[in-house]
Amino acid sequence: MKRWKTAVLLLALLLCACGGPQTAPDAPEPAEVPAQAEVPALSWDDLAWDEHLELAYAQSFAVDYAQDGFARITIDNIVHLLVPEGAEPPADTPEDVVILRQPLQNIYLQATAAMDCFRQLDAIDAVTLSGTQADGWYIPEARQAMEDGRMIYAGKYSAPDYELIVSEDCDLALESTMIYHNPEVKEQLERLGIPVLVERSSYESHPLGRMEWIKLYGVLLDREDEAEAYFDRQIQQLAPVLEQENTGRTVAFFSVTSNGSVTVRKSGDYIAKAIDLAGGVYVFPDLAADENALSTMNIQMETFYDTAKDADVLIYNSTIEANLETIDQLIAKSAPLADFKAVQSGDVWCTGKSMFQESQSVGEMILDINIILTGGEEGNLTYLRRLK
């Protein structure tokens, strides 16, 4: 009996030591935790667009900023809402607003002119789907990305591989204005939940406005400081040329088509204005725009002959027609060119194939034209070379 009582006593002591059942009549009641107040959902009308991206030359896009990292991008009257990573767009965002969610890292790029902006911002890896085959890229980094499999072909603008694009979690289709010729493609991409942004840098009439589109890609890719710094460096590099007096030397920029007509730039085109900024005079000052939005037009050789025969400089655009190496090859395209002043003096130049894919080349192009107008060192040329 004694042993049993001892065991019960030991068990009771053990329970007390381990925090067993105890009575604490004077213990205070636990304090109530106040309910956390609900944060009201952000409304579209709550976004205060009180800051703006400063643009010096570009006129085809605008960027406005609101609180919490939201950005409103307007292109051709189409509004895009850029939503920062981790945030959600307002539930009452208007249906016609295109929602873009950062980070943008699986882009289907059909607008080839935009690739150079990705390259300059060290962001080519954000483009994982290409609308151009590997052999169609003149930008080495883009071609290499396709050869390495980091970027894959997903069909051209008029016939994209929808199944592939969806399976690769595409978060943006970056299209050129060619998409407007196939509106059903744009509609299908949007039905699949893929936002579409139409690139319009080629519609900038001022050459430096075309370059300034790099700021838009800086916004999209969250690399605004890098884009701003790059653009500022280009402007500083051009400053000495832009401050020079015009040389008065006339320039014709052209190519000859397979049927013998001549493709020239309209007077308001950025190439015509680049010639002026470089210190030259474009030979077609009154070649006004017609009803279409193209920057080029075809004229008969007789018209070109009458206007450009006495031009001081000829620049042949090899990005459209075959690349040329010699003046004889040029004359073979059209015999009347042999009479031209620039042909006889040997002042005939040719562009490289990559010039129009490299949209950020405009500054270098202006510098090149200035060199050939002022007799500068030909070894410093980037995109132009003299025909032999």
Image (cartoon, rainbow, N blue to C red):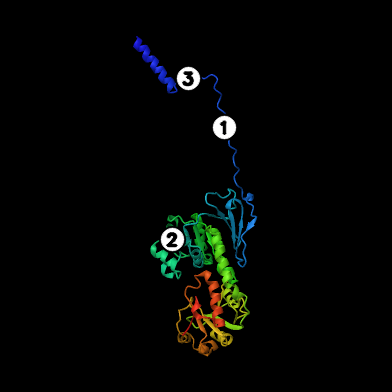
Q: In the image, residue 233 lies at what x, y percent? A: 56, 67
- Residue 257 vs 85, above or below: the answer is below
Give the quarter of the image for residue 149.
Answer: bottom left
Looking at marks 1 and 3 on the same chain, the residue that comes earlier in the sequence is marked by: 3
Q: In the image, residue 12 lies at what x, y percent? A: 41, 17
Residue ID for mark 1: 33
Q: Amino acid at mark 3?
A: Gln
State the SS at label 3: loop
Distance from the alpha carbon under mark 2 to that under mark 3:
72 Å
Residue ID for mark 3: 22
Distance from the alpha carbon under mark 1 to that under mark 3:
26 Å
Q: In the image, residue 338 lies at what x, y percent? A: 50, 89
Distance from the alpha carbon under mark 1 to that under mark 2:
55 Å
x 44%, y 20%: residue: 16
Neighbourhood count class around disc 1 (C-alpha, 10 Å): few under 14, some 14–19, many 20 upward: few
> In front: 78, or 236?
236
Residue ID for mark 2: 161
Q: Amino acid at mark 1?
A: Val
Looking at marks 2 and 3 on the same chain, the residue that comes earlier in the sequence is marked by: 3
State the SS at label 2: loop
State the SS at label 1: loop
**Residue 172 in sight from this viewpoint:** yes
Neighbourhood count class around disc 2 (C-alpha, 10 Å): few under 14, some 14–19, many 20 upward: some
Q: Amino acid at mark 2?
A: Asp
